Amino acid sequence: EAGVAQSPRYKIIEKRQSVAFWCNPISGHATLYWYQQILGQGPKLLIQFQNNGVVDDSQLPKDRFSAERLKGVDSTLKIQPAKLEDSAVYLCASSFRGEDNSPLHFGNGTRLTVT
Amino acid sequence: GEDVEQSLFLSVREGDSSVINCTYTDSSSTYLYWYKQEPGAGLQLLTYIFSNMDMKQDQRLTVLLNKKDKHLSLRIADTQTGDSAIYFCAESPVGRRALTFGSGTRLQVQP
């Protein structure tokens, strides 16, 4: 089975610019997650979708971050405008049901550098 | 609140056993997970344990859970250089569904 696909792998932008990341989950996985992983830290949840609805976006900085999953499959995460502290790896993950015993499968991430 | 803590670094010699420890705070977590992250890659699920179990063994991996002390450990037998990576433990609190991760333990395996 194909894994979680993310693009681009790397992105370098200047502060105040905009950037978008794309994720294609494993086929049939209803739940999709975006995590932010700052260097030296564990991943931190930004947003969780169940199909095309938002389950949890309590830790998403909504003044600059937005995410959508319009058809319940692919998802995009956008940052506008970017700040220096947004430099991190953005990981997308998916799971079959989003329940406790449904493991998360991660993509390889997009490494964002904001200068 | 939720807080998962791990030691930052562990160094072992090839062939020895490695033990990576984790403490968590949310007693409602029904599953606890171990993930592995190699450089430039995403997180790979290694194993997980249900909260009503004390131990789970999967080939070279042994997970021990002390629910009273909220302590989780991962033992890797016969550690190989290919096991060098960052290991994350994670909990899934009831009602939250998404995983909460620790900061990771970097395992260095010396030949």
Image: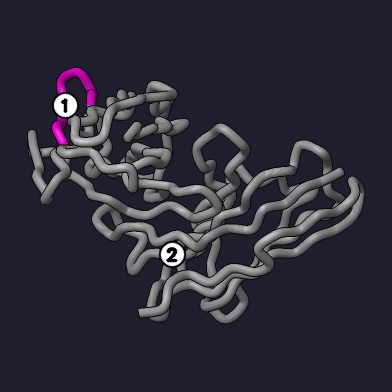
Circles 1 and 2, Cβ within 8 Å, touching? The answer is no
Secondary-structure class at tag 2: strand
Q: Nearer the viewer, residue A67 or B81?
A: B81
Identify the residue shown where x is 39% and y is 21%. B7
Residue type, mark 2 in image: Ser
Place of residue A17 in the rendered image (x, y in percent of width and height, measured from the top left):
90, 54
Q: Chain of mark 2?
A: A
Place of residue B92 in the rendered image (x, y in percent of width and height, measured from the top left):
33, 43
Q: Quadrant of the C terminus of chain B?
A: top left
Q: Which residues are magenta?
A: B63-71
Q: Is residue A36 above or below residue B29?
A: below
**What residue would you read off at disc 1?**
B67
Identify the residue shown where x is 41% and y is 24%. B9
**How packed is label 1: few (under 14 Cα within 10 Å), some, or many (20 or more)?**
some
Give yes or no for residue B68 being in the magenta stretch.
yes
Place of residue A78 in the rendered image (x, y in percent of width and height, measured from the top left):
74, 60
Q: Is residue A60 above or below residue A18?
A: above
Q: Residue extending furthest front?
A: B111
**What residue would you read off at disc 2?**
A94
Residue type, mark 1 in image: Lys
Identify the residue shown where x is 26% and y is 43%. B80
Q: Nearer the viewer, residue A11 or B79?
A: B79
Visible residue check, residue A38: yes
